[in-house]
Structure formats: structure tokens, C-alpha cells
Amino acid sequence: MIPVCRIEDLPAGESVRLDLEPPIAVFNADGELYAIDDTCTHQDASLSEGWLEGCLVECPLHAASFDLRTGRPTCLPARKAVRTHPVSVLDGTVWVHIESAQPAQTSHTAAAGQGSAA
């Protein structure tokens, strides 16, 4: 398990990027927490910098969209899913459960466009 942040530091509509190998993004989608590999499978772009609407995140580069619950793309140009990772909150700290990764640093990103059509 890797600590991400305090739950109060990840409000709805925002994301946190963990600089691991590979990078992982943790999203607060209307109070539900999700973690996925942060790199779009279509082209190198950080999904944590994308637009969040419900359980979908839209890649900021070419508008591929991914379901945070499954990691599956919901439209082209992405065809391959991103990996998902279990998330838990223990004593107010958000944790991501991953098999193998090395922590480097964490950066917060406001996911733009929440609540608007993506």
C-alpha cells in the first residue's frame, strides 16, 4: 500500500498524481475514490490533467475517455484499457494498493470541467 494524501486534501472533482513507475492517478469522483494508471493508452498524456465527469475522465490530449471503475476506454482514439488499482481510506489517509511501484513524489491537479459535458 502507498499513502496518497489526507482525505480532506482530495476534494470532489480533483485528482492526485503519484510519480511512480508507472505513474498512478487517484480521482475523487463525486465522493468515490478511484485509482488508475495515469498515462493514456493512446498517446503519452497524463489523465490526472484531464476532465472529470462522473466516473469518466477525458484525456487532455485527444479526448479519449476512460471509465474510472473499469479502466476501459469509452470512445476512440484509445482502444486499450488502463489498469485500475484498489483505493482505501484508513484513519483519514487515502491509500492505493498496488503490486509493485516505488514512490517518488505526489502532485495535486484540479480536474477541469467536472459537471460539464466532456
Image (cartoon, grey):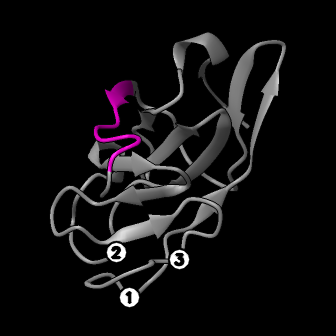
State the residue at coordinates (56%, 59%). 68
Q: Amino acid at mark 3?
A: Arg
Among the two numbered marks 2 and 1 on one chain, the one whose residue lies closer to the N terminus: 2
What crowding class fits label 3: few (fewer than 14 Cα within 10 Å), some (14-19), or many (20 or more)?
some
Q: Are marks 2 and 1 in contact (CB under 8 Å)?
A: yes
Which comes sooner in the sequence, label 2 or label 3? Answer: 2
Please name whichever residue, 30 or 35, is drawn nearer the observer in this view of the structure. Answer: 30
Task: Specify whether 28 is left or right of 109.
Answer: right
Report the Cα–Cα distance between label 2 and label 3: 10 Å
Residue 36 in the image: state x and y as whole percent: 53, 56
- Left or right side of 105 for 35: right
| Residue 53, horizontal then vertical, whole percent | 44, 50
Quadrant that contains the N terminus = top right
Label 1 amino acid?
Arg
- Point out the stretch of residues depicted in magenta: 107-116
Q: Amino acid at mark 2?
A: Thr
- Which disc, if any, is residue 79? 1
**Res 72 label:** 3
- The residue pinned by badge 2 equals 41
Q: CA distance from mark 2 to mark 1?
A: 7 Å
Q: Extreme left residue here? A: 61
Q: Is residue 111 magenta?
A: yes
SS class of the residue under badge 2?
A: loop
Specify whether 1 is left or right of 80: right
Q: Which residue appears at 47% of the width and 45% of the height?
A: 25
**Residue at x 23% of width, y 67% of height:** 63
